[in-house]
Amino acid sequence: MFVLKDPLNWIAVWVGYGNATGYPLFLTSFLGVVVFSRSLKDTPLIVTGMVSFSTGMLIISFLKWTFLYFIGSFPRACATVASLCKLFQPALFYRAARVLMMVALIPLATIRSVISKQIKDTSYGSCHHLVRSKVMISQESVSILHFSMLAFSTSFVFILSSCGAFALTELGEDNLLWDPGI
């Protein structure tokens, strides 16, 4: 809904292009897990992904122009647009958002790995069903909040969820989930 409202006003084709910009995140996050898991434990990996996603979403929530949405994902395909964007300071800001989000999906695989390491084989399916149910409930509540806030601000939910994720990482650090000696 964010891209369908002002200021972007996308049609279905642009929504498809926007969804396609998310697919490189899967590859870069996989590579991030492979590289970072050699030197970091699971919790710092999860926090890194959460901070990556939250920071990127916070920056993208202030997006005003369509070409800035794509600038970080396809810099070579948008070479002419990128050269025009050097005149504007926001283009560098949004490119930083795309770079920051390169490891945003690390928590998906890492949390599943942590859960599977800590539970018995017999309760594996029920535990993942419980986690998936909680994720679906939280997604539904965010959707309800998002639709109710569209008239106020299209990016309010992104800003709110980014602040919530930053708060969760701070709680994790306070509860000794973050081990800086790793």
Image (cartoon, rainbow, N blue to C red):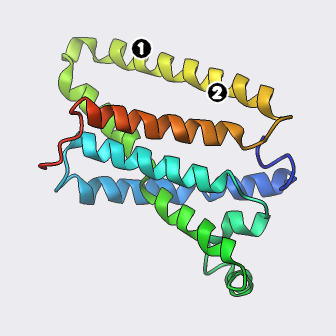
Q: Which residue is mark 2?
A: 142
Name the residue at 64% across, 21% down.
141
Q: For the N terminus, which image quadrant? A: top right
Image vertical order of residue 131 relative to residue 9, above or below: above
Image vertical order of residue 121 relative to residue 74, above or below: above
Name the residue at 82% across, 56% down.
13
Give the camera-side residue of 7 and 67: 7
> From the viewer's perspective, is 89 left or right of 2?
left
Query: Could you say where residue 62 lies in the image, as x and y percent from the top left?
Result: 70, 55
> Three-letter amino acid code at disc 1?
Leu
Image vertical order of residue 75 relative to residue 151, above or below: below
Q: Which residue is mark 1?
A: 130
**Residue 69 in which image quadrant:** bottom right
Residue furthest to the left in view is 181
Query: Could you say where residue 20 lies in the image, as x and y percent from the top left?
Result: 64, 57
Describe the element under mark 1 as helix, strand or loop: helix
Query: Could you say where residue 130 lies in the image, as x and y percent from the top left?
Result: 41, 14
Camera-nearest label, 2 or 1: 2
Name the residue at 60% across, 74% down.
92
